[in-house]
Image: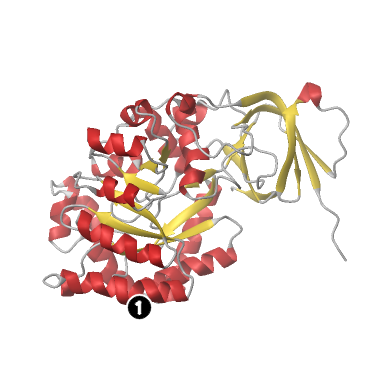
Amino acid sequence: MKTKPMTTLFINIKELVQVRELDVMKVSGKNMSILPIIKNAFLIIKDNVIVDFGSMNKLGIKKSDKVVDLTGKLVLPTWCDSHTHLVFADTREEEFVNRIKGLTYQEIAKRGGGILNSAKKLQIKPEIELFDDAEKRLKELIQNGTGAIEIKSGYGLSLESELKILRVIKKLKENFSIPIKATFLGAHAIPIKYKEKRADYIQLIIDKMIPEIAKEKLADYIDVFCEKGYFTSKETDQILKAGRKYGLIPKIHVNQFNSIGGVKVGVKNNALSVDHLEVLTDEDLSILSKSDTMSVALPSCSFFLGIPYTNARKLIDANVPMAIASDYNPGSSPSGNMNFVVSLACIKMRMTPEEAINAATINAAYALNLSNKIGSISKGKVANFIITKPIKSYSSIPYAFADNYIEKVYLEGKETQTK
């Protein structure tokens, strides 16, 4: 026997934020400064889908099973976090202290810290413990308004350990209603035992890891850390091509410290996104402006490491669509709080609140290949949205960078209490 659909009517919404037609997949240039809202609005959801919305003076008589009064409160789409390393074995406070004492990220990595440190710890940690830790982190992110997320491997650096991470991500997918995308990042660093045999490690990725991951259907995307001291643009191209043969869509780390041709390689391989971009050349901007690739900035990484921020104004002025993400990981961004990411985008990258919210919702959904389902308040999209506490406007969210203005989070039309 079929269950009768549950219809919920939300009324007196102070601002219904990010209202779009279903066919809007991303915004760029001057359009990033436009954030469509309806003041004094209503919203209707049926089970897990948005079915109607508009101004209260146009509500008329609507039948519903439940009515929720949101006087003084805002509704906006949940944040989409398109770049995280959520599954890791342990935190790295000791490296944090070393940076305070003057060591750079690169110097710590040369001493065996950084990615190799995380890989060493992960290889010996049982899968069930990795899942339990990741589950707790994901619950906390949802409480902070994240309603879709990408999670990378990359702290395994061996066939067994990379598979272990991706299986944890698969189990998270099975246990959460939040959309989760998995990315294979075996090319995160060269393992110590392959230091003098880097070509052998690349062949291991291509000949063993990618086919096995594809066989078990463990990943949606493939990623490479294209950077000096990690993987060259030529190696990146080689790995991306191998992944594409198995249906893995490229999403790559580029230009964090140096521009070495990664943007060109990413666009050439139809990358869904190129992420970091703290360093930008005119050639990179030109290539991106002629592509469908999303640029993704990671401001909390810049904040934590004390490195330059992605030049948002250059990207926006070049008509390049831009998203923002948390880069949640134990070494360079130990927080997945997207509210803070939105604040940093405004405070440090000089994005307007409208641009930052677009970057964290509709454009971030595009970077997850999910903008047909989430990222905006649109008829037919999944009912994933945030209800704020009573606040002055959506600009209050980035303005009050240390305050939590989220009262409730809805995923697939169901309320998730944040406290």
Q: Is residue 203 above or below residue 98?
A: below
Say how the picture is coloured.
secondary structure
360 shown above or below 180: above
Q: How many marks?
A: 1
Residue 289 in view: yes
Residue 124 seen: no
- Residue 30 figure quarter: top left
In percent of width and height, residue 145 lies at 54, 44
Image location (x, y in percent) of residue 410: 65, 47
Q: What is the x, y in percent for residue 36?
A: 59, 26
In terms of depth relative to the viewer, which is nearer, 88 or 191? 191
- Residue 211: image quadrant is bottom left
Horizontally, residue 273 falls left or right of residue 99, namely right
- Left/right of residue 383 with respect to residue 290 in the rendered view: right
Q: Secondary structure at mark 1?
A: helix
At 67% from the left and 51% from the top, the residue drawn is 412
10 Å crowding of disc 1: few (<14), some (14-19), many (20+)? few
Nearest the camera: 251 or 115?
A: 251
Q: Is residue 53 above or below residue 103?
A: above
- Quadrant for the N terminus, please: bottom right
Residue 293: x %, y % from top left: 40, 44
Q: Where is mark 1, residue-wise?
A: 160
Q: Amino acid at mark 1?
A: Glu
Closer to the camera in the image, 55 or 248: 248
- Is residue 150 found left or right of 300 in the rendered image? right
Q: 337 or 213: nearer the eye? A: 213
